[in-house]
Amino acid sequence: MSDNDKEITNPAPPKSRFFWRNAGILFAGVASAILIAMIILVSYSLLAVDNRFAIALAQLTHRFDDADNKIVEAQKSAMNAEQSMQQTNEALKTQAEVIADIQKASQTNKDDFLIAEAFYLVKMANDGLQYENNIPLAIKLLQSADQDIAKLSGSNVYPVRQALAADLVALQSAPQVDVAGVYVRLSALNEQIDKLPLTTQLLNNHPEVSTEMNNEKLPWWRRGLNSMQLALERIVVVRKNLPNTPPFIAPDQQVFLYQNLHMELEKAQWGLLHYQSDVYRLSLLQAMNWIKQYAVADSSVTKQLLHNLEELQQIDVHPGVPNLTGSLQALQNYTK
């Protein structure tokens, strides 16, 4: 076989190489497309992931910002709370100081009040003694004042209590007048005044007409003269009191004597209530003198009245009572 025949019989190899070349190009193109698609898909996925990551990062950043804001607010709240606590502590401290001052002032005011009350009680007791001679009331007032002073503390309280105790002992040993008892006795005697019999028998002793005046044997001129004399004696009555004989009181004048006796006993009651010894005794003395002068001496009413009046006259309605200047002076010295 010639060389031309060999060249004519071997035309196939170029076609095979062309096929495989095209196939490789196609395969490369498909692979490139797939790779591009994969790159696009991966890029999309990466973009989606990046987007989600960005969103998550933004949310996380927002949360961090919120957390920072909350931390700042918490810090501010803590600072405010600390300031409030400091202010509260300062307010409590100031309040405690104020309460201490109030308690101290309250104790001081309480002591001052007790002293003032005790002084007022002693002053009132002293006035009652001087103007009303009321010893029982003065004793009660001094005891109340001593109870007030006993609530105080301090060594300077002792002189005050000592003065009060001395005045209490003096009052308890002082003579006391039963004013109510004497007053009711005078009232009972005053009711007996109207039952007092008075000396009036002389008014009933009319001069008896002598038998000589009524003697029909006398001459007519004598009988006429006697009748004229009798008529004149009935018109004009002349009486003479015998020595040591009390004067009598006419029946229409007795009421004035009774009124005067009532007045004297009432005056004695006034002197009793006002502790006026002179008025009390002089009134009773005047009443006794009038009863002795005008009342029937043998009457049981007269005797009983005089006996009771004499007993009452012996009572001293204003005996000497101690004053309370010692207690008053001790209280004044305490307040200095």
Image: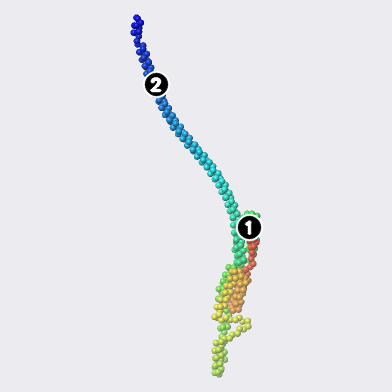
Residue 332, visible in the rendered structure: yes
Quadrant of res 220: bottom right
Front in this rendered view, residue 209 or 336: 336
The residue at which mark 1 appears reads as 335
Res 6 → quadrant: top left
Front: mark 2 or 1: 2
In this view of the protein, which residue sits in the foreground, 52 or 136? 52
Q: Residue shown at 44%/30% (left/top)? A: 53
* Quarter in which the C terminus is drawn: bottom right
- The three-letter amino acid code for the residue at tag 2 is Ser
Point out the residue furthest to the top here.
1
The type of residue carrying mark 1 is Thr
**Residue 108, located in which quarter of the rendered image?**
bottom right
In the rendered image, residue 274, in percent from the top left (x then y), is placed at 59, 69
Examine the rendered structure and indicate whether residue 153 appears above or below residue 53: below
State yes or no: discs 2 and 1 in contact (Cβ < 8 Å): no
Q: Extreme front residue here?
A: 4
Q: Quadrant of the N terminus?
A: top left
Q: Residue at the spot x=42%, y=29% of the render? A: 48
Q: Position of residue 308 (x, y in %)?
A: 60, 73
Where is mark 2, residue-wise?
32
In the rendered structure, which disc, 2 or 1, sits on the residue that comes first in sequence?
A: 2
Q: Residue at point 61% right, 83% down?
A: 241
Image label count: 2
Relative side of 278 to 29, left or right: right
Classify mark 1: helix, strand or loop.
helix
Judge by depth and name the residue closer to the eye, 265 or 108.
108
- Sort mark 2 into few (<14), some (14-19) or many (20+) by Cα contacts within 10 Å: some
* CA distance separating discs 2 and 1: 120 Å
